[in-house]
Image (cartoon, grey):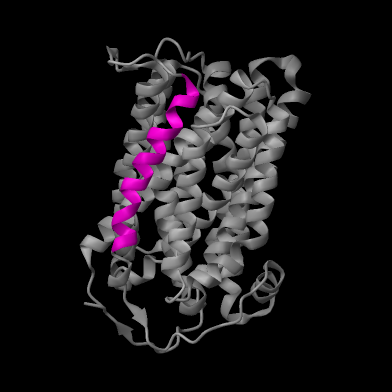
Amino acid sequence: MKTDWRLVGAWGLSDFAGTAIAMNIFTTYFALWVIKDLGSNDLTYALVKAASMVLVIAVSPTYGALADNPRRRPALLWATLAVIIGCATSLALTQNLWVAFLLFALANVGYQLSTVAINALLPLLGPPEQLGRISGIGRTIGYLGSLSAVIIGMAFATGQVFGHTLPWSKGGAHAVFAPTAALALVMSLPLLLMLKRLPHHDEHAPVPLPSLKSTINDLWHDPQLKQAAVFMIGCLFFLDTVNTIRDFMGVYLVQVVGFSETDGSLQRFLLGVVLSSLAGAICWGTLTDRWSAHKTLVAVLVTLTVGFGALVVVTDKSIVTKVLSPLIGFAFGGIIVSARTLLVQLAPPQRVGELFGVFVVCNDVAAIGGPLLWGIVVNQFSHLGAIAYQLALASQLIFLVIGTAWVARVRPAQSLARPSQTIVQKP
């Protein structure tokens, strides 16, 4: 099987599109808009997001199994793109709170499911010995989407980019949605137009569509999926930490380290994280091929543990900006790169999409439980001031260590050999 690098580039651009949408809608501006401008509150926003994640949890394995079928793959990708772009565009046209929440929930479901379908394409993009590099390239392009989203946010929300005034007035959070949707559409089209170039397995037999319950039952009892099951347990724990700290990083840095969102110190830290993540994606991707996806993921998680552990006790702004920012960002760059490559190696070829659906389930469960624990710790120890946040970060390190230990238990060589298959490369 020969790597089609143009197809790899198109696949990476789809990651670009997804990270741009995630940065400007799900992470940054939607919550600000509905709470500050439309009069909602944090609890209502959290409940709406949690409800959308519950729906994703319920349907992800089934959707992933659909994505395993080459005949259905194009329709799935077109459909999920339509949901994401359509909802993001519609958000720019409404000022009704409950319509906005509905569109947000649908867009979040579409985005989460799109990651299943796109990640499931990884084993079709090149030979096994190059999947780490391919995964790293795709993630690097994805981080460029994050950078582009930040610039779009600055341009349309504030009317300025790096201090330069633009020829339109600032529009606030609501003005960011339409240009972000347009960017995501443009970056998604290359992959959609090149889907016919994807190779396929000529012995790819149809399989019945699983439910979440049946997939979990198979992970528990099927010896061929034993190592994948161990990996998923590890994912539940380390994704808990990754999701929670990502969501509360800004608050932590302001409350504990003394950064400010108005003097540029917070932005300098975050910029360092994103730029070092770009380098990390390439480096960890190369190491994944040369070393192994399993060893690389363990090394990534250990590096992340060291970085977050230091952040618990180090409050010097200079050290945090110049040392911990690039260290943490470098580790972040390798998480998805090595994790999705390892999952491809552990999954039977006809169930890659289905197991990526379970991976999304783990991510969503972690995204609900982790922030809840963080909030409880901060609330219980609020009388201690900044120390409450340090205790919250320390509590998350426990889950990161447990997750690392479970991942270390994975034995990829013990996975049953993949069934013989012939790869048909389309012209």
Q: Residue at x 40, y 24 (%)?
A: 269
Q: Residue at x 22, y 74 (%)?
A: 2
Specify whether residue 77 is in view: yes
Q: Which sits in the foreground, 312 or 385? A: 385
Assign the N terminus to one quadrant of the image. bottom left
Could you say where residue 206 lies in the image, as x and y percent from the top left?
A: 52, 84
Count of marks placed on residues? 0
Could you say where residue 367 lies in the image, as x and y percent from the top left?
A: 62, 44
Q: What's drawn in magenta, residue-wise?
A: 172-193
Q: Where 31 sits versus 422, above or below? A: above
Quick check: 279 left or right of 231? left
Decide whether residue 72 is among the magenta residues: no
Specify whether residue 294 is in view: no
Q: Which sits in the foreground, 46 or 396? A: 46
| Residue 393 found in image quarter | top right
Q: Residue at x 54, y 46 (%)?
A: 107
Q: Where 406 sits versus 141, above or below? A: below
Q: Where 291 sits versus 105, above or below? A: below
Could you say where residue 179 lies in the image, as x and y percent from the top left?
A: 38, 33
Q: Which sits in the foreground, 77 or 26? A: 77
Quick check: 223 left or right of 126? right
Report the predominant secondary structure element of the magenta stretch.
helix
Assign the C terminus to one quadrant of the image. bottom left
Q: Residue furthest right?
A: 380
Could you say where residue 228 lies in the image, as x and y percent from the top left?
A: 56, 69
Decide whether residue 178 is among the magenta residues: yes
